[in-house]
Every structure is written in C-alpha cells, then in structure tokens.
Image (tube, rainbow, N blue to C red):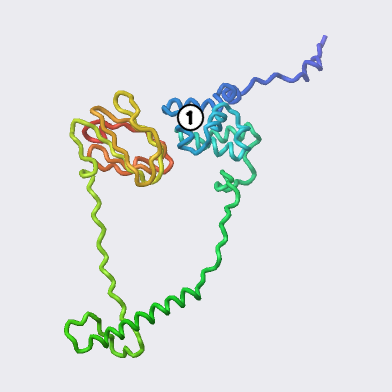
Amino acid sequence: MTIGKSPDRENAPSSVAPTEDAVQAADAPSIGRVLSTARIDAGLTVDQVSTATRVRVPIVHAVEEDDFGRCGGDFYARGHIRLIARAVGVDGDELVARYDAAHGGPPAAKRPASQLVDSGPIKVPSRGRPNWAAAMVAAIVAVVALIGFNLVSGKGGHGSTGSASAPLPSGSGTGSVAPAETPAVQPPAPAPSAAAIAAVPADKVTVKLVAEGTSWVSAMNSSGKSLFQNNISDGQDQTFTDPKQIKLVLGNGGAVHAYVNGKDLGLLGKDGQVVHVTYTPGDPQAG
C-alpha cells in the first residue's frame, strides 16, 4: 500500500536561521557607544571634544546616548557624527552609513556643507555712495597749492646759494611737479633659526608649539600632571619642559608647528587630524 505525503507537511514553510551579518549587527555596539568608548580611550573629556568640533556639549552627550533627535534632523546628525568621530579618531563614514541604514538611507541629494550651521542671512548695513566729487575737488586743491608753493619757493631762491627749494623741470610753466623718489624697501629680517627658538639642555625635553591656524592642545608631563588644555590660534605659542617626557594630544595637527629639543619638526599632522605624540630628551624621534 502506497502512503502519500501529507499536503500540509509538504507545503509547510521551512524555518530560516538568521544570517551571520544580522547576528553581528545585533551584537555590535551602538553609534553612541562607539564614539563614547573612543573618546575615553583617547583621554578626552566631553568639553574637550566640544571645543575641538564646535559641537555644543549637550549635543555631544545626546549623540553618545544615541539620542539623535536633539541634533535637529538627519542632515545635522550626520554632520555631528562625522565631526565627533574625527575628533576621537574613528571612522566617521562607517558610523554615518550605520546611521543611514537605521534611519531610512542617505538623502537623495547632498546639501552643501555650508548649510551645516544655518546662521540665517547675513545683513550688511547699507552705506551711502562715496562722494567722489568732493574727493576730486580736494585733490585738485592740494595739487594747486603744491604748485603755488613750488613757484614761490623757486622765485624767492633764484640766484641765492644754498637754496632749499628744488628747481622745476624744463617746461615748468605748465605747473607739472616732478614725482618724489620712492624710498628703498628694506628686506625682511631673517627668521630665527630652530636652535635659537628652542635650544635646550640635553638632559631635558623641551617642546615649543607655534600655531599656524587654530587647534585644541593638551600637554602632560611625565608624572601625568596637565600642563595645558586649551585652544591656540594663529601666531600663538606654548613651551613645555620636563626631565623625562612631554605627552601631547592635538585636535588639529595640521595647524601646529613643533620645535622639539632644538629641532624643527614642522607641522605635526594634516588639517583636521587628531595627533597623539610623546617626546623625550635627546633626538625628537626617540619620543
């Protein structure tokens, strides 16, 4: 006797096990947890991240807690994620891709970066047109007065020795005035050498930072004491000395020029690059 297969059993859907990618996505830390962990590993506080990125402290807290509703929309949330990720040294593009996957995908058209902070239209105070007629009249009066002075000085000093008035050129009846000589331009003073800028004893480490832009700087000595935590702007400088080592964290390595133990190391990174570096006595590369 032939026993047929049960229709219900044959057509019953088979259970599908979750994929490995889905399991990994469920186990992966959230975007805020990734940023918070990276900030702590980099030795940065929320205030320091806010200073380096210009993102307000409450927004930094909100992003680390995955509360993106306080960012003001998807466009601003993506910008905040990228800025904070760059400051703490993680891949911002990957985190933005995860954000898009969880919030309906990327926008259809990219908005210009200039709209990241909407400050509203810039109002320029209206100014009246310059009074060119008055300026021309003043210039003519000045030229006539100068010509009259030269003519009077020339007549009064004619035939006398040691006259201080300069003779008019030939054809001076037209009232033309010889142009004054342009003073020679002094060459710029030579820049001080690196040895003169940061020469130090061999048994200590000395680091001099000169800003060529704006960057947040943190400096600690060998005992872990904070020597400096603040922004330095174009033209400003800071010098740190310790018998053993100086540890630096820079929010924008492309804006900081370093002189270490009397040697010029140039810029410490690229624009926007977060740099962690330590220097000791002797050759700068030893740090």
Name the residue: 23% across, 85% down.
157
Q: Residue furthest front?
A: 156
Could you say where residue 212 lies in the image, as x and y percent from the top left? Answer: 36, 46
The amino acid beneath tag 1 is Val
Instruction: Determine which residue is flagged by label 1.
Output: 46
Check the image and report above or below for 146 versus 197.
below
Could you say where residue 150 lies in the image, as x and y percent from the top left? Answer: 30, 83
- Report the quarter where the C terminus lies: top left
Name the residue: 60% across, 48% down.
120
Could you say where residue 214 lies in the image, as x and y percent from the top left? Answer: 41, 43
**10 Å neighbourhood of mark 1: few (<14), some, or many (≥20)?**
some
Of the pair 27 and 179, the residue shown nearer to us:
179
Of the pair 218 and 92, the residue shown nearer to us:
218
Count of numbered badges drawn on the protein? 1
Of the pair 132 and 202, the residue shown nearer to us:
132
Name the residue: 56% across, 57% down.
124
Could you say where residue 218 lies in the image, as x and y percent from the top left? Answer: 37, 33
Q: Is residue 105 left or right of residue 142?
A: right
